[in-house]
């Protein structure tokens, strides 16, 4: 279980694109020529597409594995939710995700794909954390000191999740929420973005607004 406060790193679209470009270069330099690229949904969708672009590779599909929710909320076990819909027997596969954290997502992907009898499986991520028990074949950047990484394609959802972490039964003003996000997670968010996030959280039942501010909804009565 993660602590109540830990560092986060928001990666820009430009930085993400250059990481994917660097990753594709390392794959190309290795001489590995995949027959099929498989993105791990949802985090691997964008990286896999950009990697395919730089490899001039057209064959891309995906599988959905659930392990991490928003805002570093970890689920009990990494599980394949949406498997492959094609036959990959004998094919050289390249599996792409955004990051290795515990490594359980890629481990689950490889174990599942291995049961499909491909010719070869190699794995690639934008950023590989030293905390990961699984070491991918390719990565663009190594992360030595652990931090939660927020990618631009998941930023709104992640910040919403972190806002949910700072809310409690005691109402907080928007300014209090913003200060708590910065103090506990190093996340700086504008007034406009935070207002939109809190409005969406209220609409979805994840927060409620009182005269004193926003608070976490009471749990449903038994």
Image (cartoon, rainbow, N blue to C red):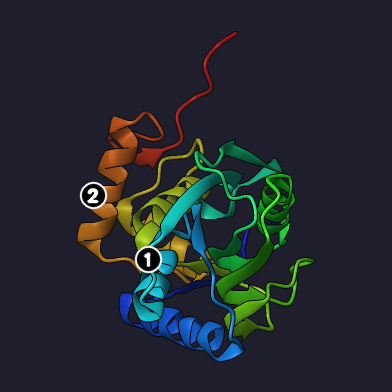
For this view, does 25 lie left or right of residue 153? right
Q: Is residue 209 visible?
A: no
Where in the figure is residue 86, as x and y percent of width and height? Answer: 51, 42
Where in the figure is residue 213, as x and y percent of width and height? Answer: 33, 42
In front: 181, or 134?
Answer: 134
Where in the figure is residue 88, as x and y percent of width and height? Answer: 58, 50
Give the quarter of the image for residue 203.
top left
> What residue would you read off at disc 1?
49
Query: Vertically, is 14 above or below 218?
Result: below
Residue reaching furthest front?
90
Assign a secondary structure to mark 1.
Answer: helix
Query: What is the crowding at mark 1: few (fewer than 14 residues within 10 Å), some, or many (at least 20)?
Result: many
* Residue drawn at the location 65% of the way across and 56% of the way down: 90
Q: Is residue 132 visible?
A: yes
* Residue drawn at the location 73% of the way across and 56% of the way down: 107
Q: Earlier in the sequence, mark 1 or mark 2?
A: 1
Query: Vertically, is 160 above or below 180?
Result: above
Say the numbered circle drawn on residue 196. Answer: 2
For this view, does 157 lie left or right of residue 168? left
Query: Vertically, is 78 above or below 59?
Result: above
Say the numbered circle drawn on residue 177. Answer: none
Q: Which quadrant of the figure contains the C terminus?
A: top right
């Amino acid at each position: 279980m993660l602590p109540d406060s830990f560092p986060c790193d928001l990666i820009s679209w430009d930085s993400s694109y250059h990481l994917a470009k660097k990753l594709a270069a390392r794959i190309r330099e290795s001489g590995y020529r995949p027959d099929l690229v498989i993105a791990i949904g949802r985090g691997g969708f964008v990286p896999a597409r950009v990697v395919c672009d730089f490899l001039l590779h057209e064959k891309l599909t995906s599988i959905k594995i659930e392990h991490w929710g928003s805002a570093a909320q970890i689920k009990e076990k990494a599980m394949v939710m949406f498997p492959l819909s094609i036959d990959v027997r004998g094919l050289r596969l390249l599996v792409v995700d955004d990051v290795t954290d515990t490594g359980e997502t890629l481990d689950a992907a490889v174990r599942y794909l291995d049961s499909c009898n491909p010719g070869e499986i190699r794995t690639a991520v934008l950023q590989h954390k030293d905390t990961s028990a699984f070491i991918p074949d390719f990565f663009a950047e190594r992360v030595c000191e652990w931090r939660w990484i927020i990618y631009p394609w998941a930023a709104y959802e992640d910040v919403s999740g972190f806002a949910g972490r700072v809310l409690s039964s005691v109402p907080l003003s928007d300014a209090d929420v913003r200060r708590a996000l910065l103090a506990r997670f190093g996340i700086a968010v504008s007034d406009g973005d935070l207002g939109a996030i809190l409005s969406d959280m209220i609409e979805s039942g994840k927060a409620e607004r009182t005269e004193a501010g926003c608070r976490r909804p009471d749990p449903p009565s038994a």
